[in-house]
Image (cartoon, rainbow, N blue to C red):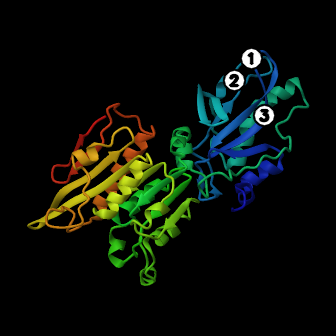
């Protein structure tokens, strides 16, 4: 594990050196033990919270635009018990994550903005604490009690400030699954990995026995160098090398699904099937059904008509509560080839791969409540390229 953020950023290090009870929880900067006065004129201790959106990688930047701070506790008052209205922003309970709910937010911005997080947090602490010190000169937020600031349990190497800055950290926690599997990381599967790697899934297991070849570079996210292509890496190893820079739980499995490998899959909370039709897909679907694993299967049927392309992009969902449509309606093809197989030409286009992946990941997020949705959730959807239309079928 890399050193704590506090040792790599002077502004955070100064907060620790000054003696503040500093922690980084749920991608937020937290200062506990801040003395304040409540409406009864009593001195109490509250918690000052700031999002960590002004950070790039693991290096903090000036939070000039992020001047709002949050507060857990009663609303702070002056020494006479009068609320500090000059800094009030919003009063409403907002859960940030387990064990951390804020009750109020403040908005007080210097004319030139805050220089760094030390400037921001100490300015707010001073505005609140000064009134408590009028009643008790001995109180201080600078207790020199240190709290570890990095979350060693986080699946990320650095905080998810994208969620923190817009207040959806608690919603994102719905995706804190133990293990998700992605089967096939060619065109669509590689984009699925790109999107899932940006969620707090503990482990993302990727399965594919193929080599990452030159044509794969033109239908996968990113841009491999010629040198990388010459090394002929396995798809899973190449992609794990990229996304492990961000997510700690990318685990590659360089084998194809077959009778002698199906037992190696292990337990899953969800699966994305991004494989070509055939016997291996049938084996995988049967395995997932037998183990009550919900899954999404994706596919594209793209054809060349004269001098242009047309076709469908498909997302089929199967859950323990609804499975029959997969076979009864023949939503998923298990054919190994032949003239009736719409996938035989296997035309892959990067933008449609990305769209197929995005639709699959959105459906996954709906399944776990990240997105609000129609109670009669569709289990099969087709996007028609020519008409730019999505049709939804097999509703609950």
Label located before the other in sequence (1 or 3) = 3
Crowd rating for badge 1 (residues with CA inside 10 Å; few <14, some 14–19, many 20+): some
Q: Nearer the viewer, residue 226 or 293?
A: 293
Q: What element does badge 3 sit on? A: strand
Q: Position of residue 245 (x, y in %)?
A: 56, 65
Query: Residue 366, how many percent across, how many down?
Result: 40, 40
Which residue is more in the foreground, 202 or 349?
A: 202
Mark 1 and mark 2 residues within 8 Å of each other at the beta carbon: yes
Residue farthest top in this picture:
40
Are dots 1 and 3 in contact, CB under 8 Å?
no
The quadrant of the picture occupied by the N terminus is: bottom right
Q: CA distance from mark 2 to mark 3?
A: 12 Å
Looking at the rendered structure, which numbered label has been put on residue 75?
2
Residue 328 lies in quadrant: top left
Q: Which mark is residue 116?
A: none
Tell which circle, 1 or 2, labels the residue nearer the N-terminal end. Answer: 1
277 sits left or right of 262 in the view: left
Which element type, helix, strand or loop, lies under badge 1? Answer: loop
Q: Is residue 232 left or right of residue 12?
A: left
Q: Earlier in the sequence, mark 2 or mark 3?
A: 3
Q: Which label sits on residue 39?
A: 1
Q: Quadrant of residue 186?
A: bottom left
Query: Around disc 2, counting alpha carbons within 10 Å, would you say few (fewer than 14), some (14 to 19), or many (20 or more)?
Result: many
User: From the viewer's perspective, is residue 286 above or below residue 82?
Assistant: below
- State the residue at coordinates (30%, 39%): 378
User: Does the image show residue 327?
Assistant: yes
Q: Quadrant of the C terminus?
A: top left
Describe residue 293's horizontal placement relative to residue 41 as left or right: left
Q: Secondary structure at mark 2?
A: loop
Tell me residue 222's x, y (percent). Answer: 42, 68
Q: Which residue is mark 3?
A: 34
């Amino acid at each position: 594990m890399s050193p704590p953020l506090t040792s790599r950023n002077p502004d955070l290090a100064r907060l620790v050196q000054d003696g503040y009870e500093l922690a980084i929880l749920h991608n937020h900067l937290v200062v506990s033990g801040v003395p304040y006065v409540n409406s009864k004129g009593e001195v109490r201790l509250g918690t000052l919270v700031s999002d960590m959106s002004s950070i790039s990688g693991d290096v903090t930047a000036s939070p000039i635009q992020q001047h709002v701070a949050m507060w857990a506790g009663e609303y702070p008052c002056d020494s006479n018990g009068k609320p500090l209205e000059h800094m009030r922003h919003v009063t409403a309970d907002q859960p940030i994550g387990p064990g951390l709910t804020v009750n109020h937010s403040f908005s007080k911005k210097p004319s030139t903005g805050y220089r760094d997080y030390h400037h921001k947090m100490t300015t707010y602490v001073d505005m609140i604490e000064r009134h408590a010190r009028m009643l008790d000169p001995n109180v201080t937020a600078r207790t020199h009690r240190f709290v570890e600031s990095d979350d060693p349990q986080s699946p990320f190497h650095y905080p998810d400030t994208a969620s923190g800055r817009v207040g959806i950290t608690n919603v994102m926690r719905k995706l804190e699954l133990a293990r998700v599997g992605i089967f096939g990381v060619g065109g669509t599967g590689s984009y699925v990995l790109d999107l899932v790697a940006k969620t707090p899934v503990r482990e993302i297991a990727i399965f594919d026995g193929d080599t990452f070849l030159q044509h794969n570079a033109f239908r996968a996210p990113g841009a491999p160098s010629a040198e990388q292509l010459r090394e002929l890496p396995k798809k899973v190893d190449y992609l794990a090398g990229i996304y492990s820079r961000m997510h700690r739980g990318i685990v590659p499995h360089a084998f194809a699904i077959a009778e002698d490998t199906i037992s190696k899959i292990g337990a899953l909370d969800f699966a994305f099937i991004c494989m070509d039709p055939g016997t291996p897909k049938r084996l995988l679907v049967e395995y997932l059904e037998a183990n009550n694993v919900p899954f999404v299967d994706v596919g594209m049927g793209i054809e060349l008509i004269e001098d242009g392309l047309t076709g469908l992009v498909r997302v089929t969902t199967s859950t323990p509560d609804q499975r029959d449509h997969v076979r009864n309606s023949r939503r998923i093809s298990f054919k190994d080839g032949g003239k009736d197989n719409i996938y035989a030409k296997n035309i892959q286009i990067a933008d449609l791969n990305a769209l197929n992946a995005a639709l699959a990941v959105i459906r996954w997020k709906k399944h776990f409540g990240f997105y609000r949705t129609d109670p009669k959730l569709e289990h099969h959807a087709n996007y028609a390229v020519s008409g730019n239309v999505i049709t939804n079928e097999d509703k609950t």
